[in-house]
Every structure is written in C-alpha cells, then in structure tokens.
Image (spheres, rainbow, N blue to C red):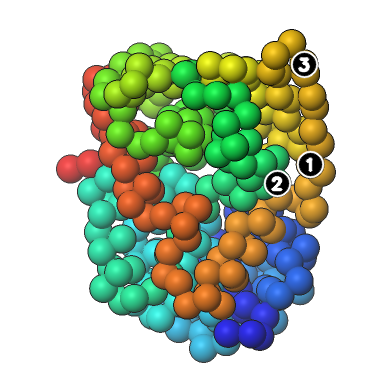
Amino acid sequence: MTDPIRWGILGTGNIAKQFARGLTSVENARLVAVGSRAPETAAAFGDEFEVPHRHATYEALAADDEVDAIYVSTPHPFHKDNTILCLTSGKAVLCEKPFTVNAAEAAVVIDVARTENRFLMEAMWTRFVPAVVRVRQLLAEGAIGDVRMVQADFGFRAGVNPEGRLFNLDLGGGALLDVGIYSLSFAAMILGTHPEQVVSTADLGSTGVDEQSAFLLRYGGGELAVLSCAVRTSTAIDVRIFGTEGSIFVGSPFFKSESLTVKRGGEETTEHYPLEGNGYNYEAIEVGNCLRECRTESQTMPLDETLALMKLLDSIREPWGLKYPSDG
C-alpha cells in the first residue's frame, strides 16, 4: 500500500476530535469518513473537519469501501462490539484505550482480528511520542544501568457527574480504566506485563467507581512499579525511572512529554523533543507503517501485551470489589 491511508473515525466525542486534529499532521493519511449514531452529529463533525463521508450509523461507516482504517473512539464498554464490527467488515482498527472493559472482552476481540487477519492495535499513543521512544532507546543502551523502580502517576480533579463517563459504572467509569492504564502501560513498557505480585487499594466514590487508587507491582528480580491514578485528585503526572547507575525523569504530562532528564554519575542532562502536531499523529503513523508493511500487529504495542495489560487491570481492581456490567 503506497497511497495515503484513508481513515474513518467511529464516534464524535472529544477524543475523536483530538485524533482528527492529529491526522492533519500525518503526511500520508486522509480523514475521509466519520460514523455517528445520528445524522446531525455526523454532519457537525464532518463540517468541523471537512470530512467528505458522514455516516449516521456505525454500520454504514464500517461498510464504507473508501475507508482503510477506523479509529474507534467510543466509551469503554462499546469498544468490543464496535471493533468487532469494523474488523469483520474488512477494516484495520485502532481502538482507543483502555482496549476493552476487561480481559475476557479483549481476548474475544483479539481472536476476531487474528481470525480475520486484520490489523488491530490499542491506541496507546504515548508509546510513539518522540520523548518516550527516546526513553526506550536510553534503557536499551544501559544509560542508567539495570532498572530497579518505576514511579508514575496520572490524576486530575473532575466534578462529580453521576451520568458522565468518568463516574458512571455503566460507561466503564473510574480512574483506573480512564487514566490508570497510562501509568500501567508505561511501567509495563519497561518492566514487562508479568509481575510476581500485585497489591492495590482504592477509594470508591458515591457512584461506585474508583475515584483514586494506588497499585504496586513487584517483578521477579525485585523490580518495583509504584503507580497511581485519580479523577478527583490532581497529581504531578510524571514518570521517574530509577536504575543501578542513574535515573530518567519524564516531564509532565508524561503521556505527551516533550522533555526528559537523565542523571548519571553526578551529571544531569535534559533533552527536548518537541511534538509535531498534537501527539495523536504518531500512533496514526505507526498504523500506516504497519499497513504498508502488511503487518497485522504493531511491534511496539502488540496484542499479547494489550491482553496482558487488561488482565493486570482486572487483577488490580478485583480486591476492591469493583465490577462493571460486562464483567458478568
């Protein structure tokens, strides 16, 4: 595939708009279609981003022959069905994080993608921003020796709206699924997805969702990941990686950081990596590269890792008694 990747966006919320803006910074990509549950919202989105094909149903978007790849941007509980619809309609899919509500759903979606031989990736855009790419390079080079501990947090203070996405159990509300996945995925990128021990605690609010939580992961070599997230508490939103010979600090907000600082042997060096576009463009570039290379998975965000992360999310919230309708 040498022509520009023709994108469709399923959903018209804020995250869909962010991705649409990101696509404007991708040289070999075009936003050609949007799908909504109503003609008026599809039309409004289409007008705002000059999208030629405006579909009043998700099914119509999935069936659009002018679309190569679809970005699924609906609330968490709808990811499974929306993604399967697109995959079985012959489309490559970039599915917003968290990939699904639980690991059981994730396993079903991944199985469909592999059966259909279609590209699928979790939209963990942080993996692809230049500063985080540089973190992986530094660690591979042994810049701070052996990693011993990763600290990461992502918290903000939102007003409680029982019907809103963040606080409604039916919509997969809570801090863990919404922003905890960022901290967990970052730590897993460094230490892996198979800790020997997981310990966690949370404050469940009036609507039953986790308003803030902390979780500790211990790995086979004694490495630790110390992580937290919140939707009712503002935090630093940074990452610190400690090794046997130094440390790396990823500046706030770490999920789209433009700088990092390396400390080693009494010396401190700060490196700057300005974003091109709004940051969402980098994951779109990854999808395009994979499709042109006829790959059905990303090596940077592989499906087995996505499934392992969903299993970790399940294990983190299990002691809290936090269950969603789709958990069964």
The kind of residue on which mark 2 rests is: Pro
SS for callout 3? strand
Crowding at mark 3 (Cα within 10 Å: few <14, some 14-19, many 20+) = few
The picture quadrant where one finds residue 261 is top right
The kind of residue on which mark 1 rests is: Tyr
Mark 3 or mark 1: which is in front? 3
Q: CA distance from mark 3 to mark 2?
A: 23 Å
Cβ–Cβ under 8 Å for marks 3 and 1 = no
Circle nearer the N terminus (3, 2): 2
Crowding at mark 2 (Cα within 10 Å: few <14, some 14-19, many 20+) = many
Of the numbered discs in the image, which one, if any, rests on residue 267?
3
Q: Which residue has dot 1 on it?
A: 273
Residue lying farthest to the bottom in this orientation: 65
**Is 293 on the left-hand or right-hand side of 110?**
right
Residue depicted at 48% across the width and 18% down the height? 149
Circle nearer the N terminus (3, 1): 3
SS for callout 1? loop
Q: Is residue 134 visible?
A: yes
The picture quadrant where one finds residue 25 is bottom right
SS for callout 2? helix
Residue depicted at 70% across the width and 46% down the height? 130
Of the numbered discs in the image, which one, if any, rests on residue 130?
2
